[in-house]
Amino acid sequence: MGTNEQHGRPVPATPPGPPPVPEPALTDRDFWHGAALDLDAYLARLGLSGSPPPTLDTLTAVHRAHLAAIPFENLQLLLGRPVPLDVPSLTDKMVHHRRGGYCYEQNLLLAAALDRLGFTLTAFTARVLLGGDGRPRPSTHALLRVRVKGEPWLADVGFGGGGLVEPLRFADGQQVSQGGWNLRLDRVSEIGDEEWLLRGFEGRQWRNLYSFAASGVLPQDYAVFSHYLTTHPRSPFRHRLMVARTVGGTRYALDDTTLSVERVDGTGEVRELALGEVGTVLREVFDIALDQEERRIIEARVREFLDA
C-alpha cells in the first residue's frame, strides 16, 4: 500500500509508467521430457530407425507407424494396475513390454518422441462425441498440435474409435482422405470462439468424432483427467474391455467379446468370440501377449461385464 491517504484511508500507489514485460511464470519448460525416452527402442517398436529430421514426412511416418504398432487398450485397469503417465513408465510399458494404452498414454508417448526429434508441440483436450446422444461430455480425450516449419498440424494416435491415420492440417474446412479414411475439420462456435470439430465419413454420412478448444494443457493436466477416468465408478474404461488397432486400410476393434473389422472399401464383419478366444485374439490381432495369469484375470473381468 502507498503512503498517500484519501479521506483518512490509505490508497494504492500508482505504478510508474507501463508495466515491464512479464517474466515466464513457469521455470521448468521441459514439458514433454523427450530426453527420458529411449528413442531407438521406440522407433524400432514402430519399425523405423535412424534419427529422422523434424519434417512433415517424419511426422507422417511416425504417426502412421505408431498407430499401426501400438494398440489402443485399457487392460491395465482390468488387471487392477495403476496407469502412470511419466515417460519412463510409458516407454517401459508400450515400448519394452509391447503393450498398448489409452489416449493419455499414447499421445504423451508420441509427444515425448516428437519433442526428442525436434518438433514444437502443444497439447489439447477434446470432448468425445462419437456414440453420444448430444448431451455435453467433459473434455477427457488427448490430442496434439505439432508445428512443422511454422505450420500447424493435428496429431492423435490415441482415439480408439477411428480418427486420424496421419497428421491433419490444422485449418478450417480441411477435408482429406487418409488412405481411404475420410476426415474433415471445421471451426465451430457452440461453447467458445476457438472451438473445432473433427468428423469422419462413414457409410453415407459424416459422424462427429470429437470437438476441442485450441487451449494448451500440460501433462500435469492430463494426470488429473486420467485420474478421473481411471477411478470414477461410471467411467467406461472400468466396465468393459476396449481394444482397437488401425493397420493401413483396416480397423480392428474388440469390445468385450465382440470383434469388429472395418475396411476402407466398405466391407467388414462382426464376430462374437467365445470367452476363451479373447486372449488369442489379443495376441494374433492386436499383438498383445498376456501371460497365463493375466489372461485368466481378463477373462474373469469380461465374464463379469457380460453377466452384469
Image (tube, rainbow, N blue to C red):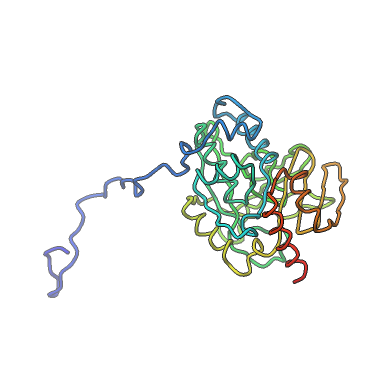
Residue 226 placement, left or right of 48: left
Q: Quadrant of the N terminus?
A: bottom left
Kindly identify the residue that appears in the image at 50 percent across and 32 percent down.
118
Q: Position of residue 245 (x, y in %)?
A: 72, 45
Of 12 and 136, nearer the camera is: 136
Residue 139 percent across, percent down from the top left: 58, 59
Is 282 or 161 nearer to us in this picture? 282
Determine whether 50 is above or below 30 in the image.
Answer: above
Residue 228, located in which quarter of the rendered image?
bottom right
From this view, report whether residue 233 is shown above or below residue 46. Answer: below
Q: Which of 216 and 258 lies nearest the eye of the viewer?
A: 258
Residue 273 screen position, x and y as percent: 83, 56
Quadrant of res 180: top right
Residue at x 68%, y 65% (from the top left corner): 239
Exactly how many numbered labels are in the figure?
0
Q: Please indicate whether residue 69 sits to the left or right of residue 260 in the image.
A: left
In the figure, is residue 239 to the left or right of 120?
right
On screen, residue 265 above or below 40: below
